[in-house]
Image (spheres, helix red, strand yellow):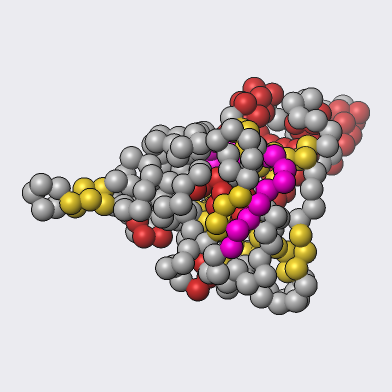
């Protein structure tokens, strides 16, 4: 017969929430995450202080073209958040296509924001970032600025996704840079498998759509011009922005300016996110409805 004190001890252990035994995030993965940020210094070196956001010949939601000027520095992750990092920070891996260095997918924007808040606390505790630094989703302006990487063309490598060959066929110029319907067998490669853009950022075109911090508006009327994002004060449903296209999309949806509005609670195996690291700075609220 089991001694009474053993039975009571077992009962008490079972009552303790499992979160009490949660492990701290892997310090090596946290260090790798920090080391993989690319410093962006608008107005210094190769980084222009201003850029034109949007497209003159694109759909209405990419217009009007407007100049954005940055008065602050930030850093952006070289890669979309991989599954091993997401799992060590949150204890979960919701992804359909499993792989430690595959981009994490199948989370809502709210879950992506939760990850950013948790990893910020872990990085501060590990003294890998300063106390006034945060990790968050990029604003839509920050995202497009980094996707363009100083270019003014449809893609960071030029205006055309394909070119004619001597045989009269079309050869892809996009394939070396992006996973899309023309070259992706499935959403299962590791991050950074293809070529980066001119600033060393991978998978900005294709692979996965990426959450940004902005809520959706169907055009750029009254858009911020200082790099901040837009959060709308509205009741009921909410639509948020994703950028960049995915492995499920055709080449024409992978441009630097393509944007899409999706439900705030949506999750998909073609949506992920990357992070920025920045000194704390408020997101700009926008009154009214989009």
Residue lying at 51% horizontally and 43% vertically, measured from the top left: 149
Residue 237 location (% of width, % of height): 68, 74
In the current view of this chain or complex, which residue is farthest to the left?
A: 167
| Figure quadrant of the N terminus | top right
Residue toward you, 225 or 77: 225
The quarter of the picture where residue 252 lies is: bottom left
The image quadrant where one finds the C terminus is bottom right
Q: Which residues are magenta?
A: 66-81
Q: Position of residue 129 (x, y in %)?
A: 76, 30
Is 75 magenta? The answer is yes
Q: In the image, is residue 94 above or below residue 123?
A: below
Q: Is residue 102 above or below residue 226?
A: above
Q: Please say whether residue 243 is visible from this viewpoint.
A: yes
203, above or below 227, in the image: above
In the picture, residue 5 is in which quadrant? Answer: top right
Magenta stretch: includes residue 55: no
> Where in the figure is residue 60, as x and y percent of width and height?
50, 73
* Relative height, residue 233 to residue 174 (above, below): below
Looking at the image, which residue is at 43% across and 46% down? 156
């Amino acid at each position: 017969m089991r001694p009474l004190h053993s039975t009571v001890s077992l009962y008490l252990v079972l009552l303790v929430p499992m979160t009490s035994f949660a492990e701290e995030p892997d310090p090596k993965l946290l260090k790798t995450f920090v080391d993989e940020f690319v410093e962006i210094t608008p107005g210094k070196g190769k980084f222009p202080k201003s850029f034109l956001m949007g497209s003159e010949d694109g759909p209405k939601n990419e217009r009007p073209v407007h100049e954005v000027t940055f008065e602050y520095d930030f850093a952006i992750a070289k890669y979309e958040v991989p599954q091993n990092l997401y799992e060590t920070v949150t204890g979960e891996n919701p992804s359909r296509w499993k792989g430690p260095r595959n981009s994490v997918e199948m989370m809502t924007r709210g879950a992506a924001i939760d990850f950013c808040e948790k990893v910020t606390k872990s990085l501060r505790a590990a003294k890998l970032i300063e106390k006034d630094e945060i990790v968050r989703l990029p604003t839509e302006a920050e995202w497009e600025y980094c996707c363009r990487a100083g270019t003014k063309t449809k893609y960071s490598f030029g205006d055309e996704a394909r070119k004619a060959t001597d045989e009269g066929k079309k050869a892809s110029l996009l394939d070396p840079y992006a996973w899309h319907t023309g070259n992706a067998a499935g959403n299962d490669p590791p991050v950074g498998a293809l070529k980066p853009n001119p600033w060393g950022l991978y998978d900005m075109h294709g692979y996965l759509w990426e959450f940004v911090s902005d809520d959706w508006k169907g055009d750029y009327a009254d858009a911020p011009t200082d790099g901040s994002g837009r959060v709308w004060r509205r009741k009921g449903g909410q639509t948020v922005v994703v950028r960049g296209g995915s492995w499920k999309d055709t080449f024409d949806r992978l441009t630097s300016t393509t944007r899409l509005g999706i439900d705030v609670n949506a999750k998909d195996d073609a949506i992920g996110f990357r992070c920025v690291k920045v000194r704390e700075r408020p997101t700009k609220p926008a009154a009214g409805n989009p």
